[in-house]
Image: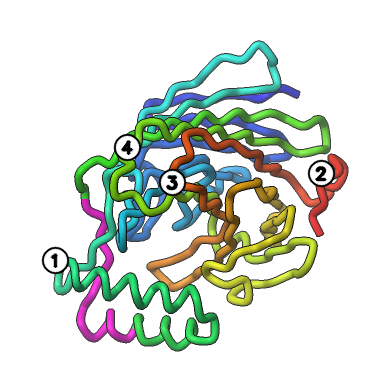
Amino acid sequence: MGVALECAPALVRADVGDGLSLIFRESEGGPWHYPSCRIQKGLVLCCGDRELVEEGTGFGVPLLRFGHETVFPGGARAAVESRTNGDALGIRVDYELNLVERMAAGGEIIGGRMFYAAKEYLAGLHRRYPPLRGVGTWASNGLRTVCRLGTRFETAATRGVVNVLYTIQRAGEGRGAVLHVVVNLGGIQREGCTGIIIANEQGANYFDRYRDSKQALVGRAIGTWDETQADLASFVDSRDNIAFVLRRIEGARMFRGWERVENRLAWSGLSYVIPINTVSFDYDIQIGTPNDLRSARIPVF
């Protein structure tokens, strides 16, 4: 069975079988209701008509770190590439890195480097010390309510364009699909850049189970930003019986995360942190039911 393609002005959809599809749509074009909806998402996994990404970034999304600040893609240009193999589809996306997170109090944007440096310091404590995460989230939610704080994503100076080529290929009947991601970082600003992240996220209310060769975790036990040393790591949507699997790539660090805060956060997934001198980076994501992936000799533990 080949990869079926549907195109619309703001949408590219690749049907990969078993009721699953991967879509790409322009920023703010989806049925999402989170502050981060301004971020340009990557490929979104769908089960039937349901998009499973929620607040997540989607698959294969480049992010840049400059000091205490993360720069997100605020827009993109997409083109479908033809393939001689009828079972493969290529989608080339140019992401413009020009969006930053800001806080607003009573609707007014808060400025000042010190404020955001302090915010990032507290976020760093949250990531480094798991026992503090529950208390930190509770305090943050309370402060947001009392001070009427909200998250905004604002356009900033462009830090470059990152080209990503997605190739979607069926692995064979009953064996799921493979998404091959090639990231070209030749067009980013290197001066001042302190980190490059390639995010692979879907929704936390769907993908609530994490498994690798060493452990199985559910929900908050997964953590919000914990490094994994496993060669293979997977997230499972226990509602729809869907899994996606990534491999550890030599020279890159792989982090897992799951966060769900009502009306604000709902993401789960795996991210690569790669050296800042990287020009090209590629990897595979296996997608399908756990049985499909086991049939393709990909362990879903």
Residue 75 seen in the figure: no
Q: Which residue matches tag 1? A: 111
Label 4 to label 1: alpha-carbon separation: 23 Å
Q: Residue 292: which numbered mark, if any?
A: 2
| Disc with the residue nearer the chain's start (4 vs 3) | 4
How many marks on residues? 4
| Disc with the residue nearer the chain's start (1 vs 2) | 1
Q: Are marks 2 and 3 in contact (CB under 8 Å)?
A: no
From the viewer's perspective, is 157 left or right of 262? Answer: left
Q: Which residue matches tag 3? A: 276
Q: Quadrant of the N terminus?
A: top right
Give the magenta range.
142-154
Q: Identify the amino acid type marked 4.
A: Glu
Label 2 to label 3: alpha-carbon separation: 36 Å
Label 2 to label 4: alpha-carbon separation: 35 Å
Label 4 to label 3: alpha-carbon separation: 18 Å
Instruction: Please tell me which residue lies in front, 124 or 174.
Output: 124
